[in-house]
Image (cartoon, rainbow, N blue to C red):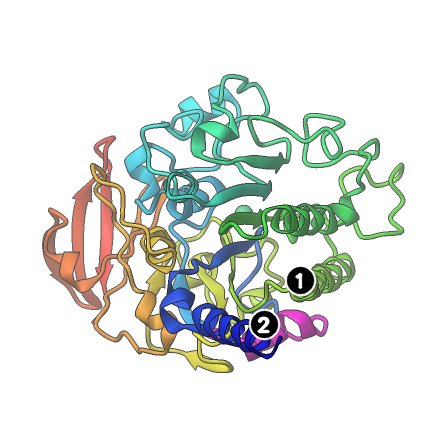
Amino acid sequence: MALKGLRMVATLVVFSALISAPAWAKEERPNIVFFLTDDMGYGDTGCYGGKFVPTPNIDRLAKEGTRFTQFYAASPVCSPSRTGFLTGMYPARWKITNFLQTRAGNRASEQVDFLDLKAPSIARTLKEAGYATGHFGKWHMGGGRDVTNAPHFSAYGFDEHAGTYESPEPDPNITATNWIWSAQDKVKRWDRTAYFVDKTLDFLKRHKGQPCYVNLWPDDVHTPWVPEGSNLKRKQEGDDSNVNFKKVLKEYDRQVGRFLDGLKELGLEQNTVVVFSSDNGPLPAFGGSRTGGLRGSKISLYEGGTRMPFIVRWPGHTPAGRVDDQSILGGVDLFPIFCSLASVPLPKGSAFDGENLEKALFGKQLSAVIRCSGNTAATVLLVIPRSRATAARMSPFATGIGRFWSMRTARGRSCMIWKRT
Ligand SMILES: [Ca+2]
């Protein structure tokens, strides 16, 4: 009996050593949840100086993770910005330079109707490496209005999905009509973020034991603002008032908290990287108060349209409570960063514009990065690290306020590039 007991103890000791060994832990790939807000201003939340309503849950994320003050979306408009996130490439390379709309509108904008399947997709890359993948929320990279031939979510590498009307497969619970929202929607406008949070938590719960990549991309805090208690018959389009914005933002923050609590309850808090950001600047911007005083707003290439809140929390990896006001990161950098976090090599055959700047997430200040922004009749923003700045086939010329480059876009329009040193 004693010998058997000793053997059991020895077995338990060996087993415990195995499961706590650093090598084993290193091999466990983290979940990545990309929480992308729609049209959130740089100055909307408390941790970025916002005074509209308290945002204790988003602030908590910043307190428990690292908050960046120089993160730039790939465009100040939904579709191209999202394309930058998903592909790791400048959206103009895939001929998406404006918000995707009707076929006629897309022709007028000299852009395609949906994201080319030849483009890289972070979900596809991670799925091929063993990740379970989900997209819950607004897509806006094809589908909706009269565009009925956009590729399905699975073609971009997603196992599961719940999309809004601007997607190839609108979720029937939130798309009673072919519009942003409707009074007939089963899940009301004010419950949509909760709906997407529930979908995400359920997905993570069902895929425990497998690494997960999830786009949690609500369509809050985009207008129309329709908080609970709104008179749906009287205000079908919602009410874009400061009062309603505050109610929507407050509820949105509450849902961020629900997500964080849910993650903890699932026991997934420690090994989940939560990335929080916005796709483009606010509109209306309420006199610049929503951009934290930055010039411009959504649609504008000024900082108010492109500089985004960016918070990353991965307990034990991202320094807690750190504010990085030096490193400059862009939306196109997330593809290589996510691959690196997941220990997955970048797929071959694509000329990625983003770079793996994951060291910034782990506390290293990256100062030697240049940000360049470009403007055309359509909207394009370029974020070019120093190592690439000379390889962009640009023609430099000097002006009194900085160095500029002219660049030809695919459609022959000239593009102004400003270099900050
Ligand atoms: Ca947007």
**Residue depicted at 51% across the width and 60% down the height:** 277
Task: Find numbered disc 2 in the image and state the secondary structure of the residue it sits on.
Answer: helix
**Residue depicted at 44% across the width and 24% down the height:** 113
Callout 2, which amino acid?
A: Leu
Q: Position of residue 88 (x, y in %)?
A: 33, 47
| Residue 171 visible here | yes
Task: Find numbered disc 1 in the image and state the secondary structure of the residue it sits on.
Answer: helix
Which span is picked out in magenta?
A: 46-67
How many residues crowd around disc 2 within 10 Å: few (fewer than 14), some, or many (20 or more)? Answer: many
CB of residue at label 2: within 8 Å of ligand 1?
A: no
72 and 347: which is toward the camera: 347
Query: Residue beneath label 1, please?
Result: 256
Q: Quadrant of the image for the N terminus?
A: bottom right
216 and 15: which is toward the camera: 15
Checking the image for residue 61, the label placed there is 2
Q: Are marks 2 and 1 in contact (CB under 8 Å)?
A: yes
Residue 256 to residue 360: above or below: above
Is 61 included in the stretch rendered in magenta? yes
Label 2 – label 1 distance at C-alpha:
9 Å
293 and 350: which is toward the camera: 350
How many residues crowd around disc 1 within 10 Å: few (fewer than 14), some, or many (20 or more)? Answer: many
Checking the image for residue 47, the label placed there is none
Residue 273 to residue 77: above or below: below
| Residue 49 visible here | no
Q: Position of residue 256 (x, y in %)?
A: 67, 62
109 and 331: which is toward the camera: 331
Sequence-first tag of 2 and 1: 2
Q: Quadrant of the image for the C terminus?
A: bottom left
Q: Which image quadrant for residue 231?
A: top right
Q: Position of residue 351 (x, y in %)?
A: 21, 42
Callout 1, which amino acid?
A: Val
**Residue depicted at 11% across the width and 51% down the height:** 391
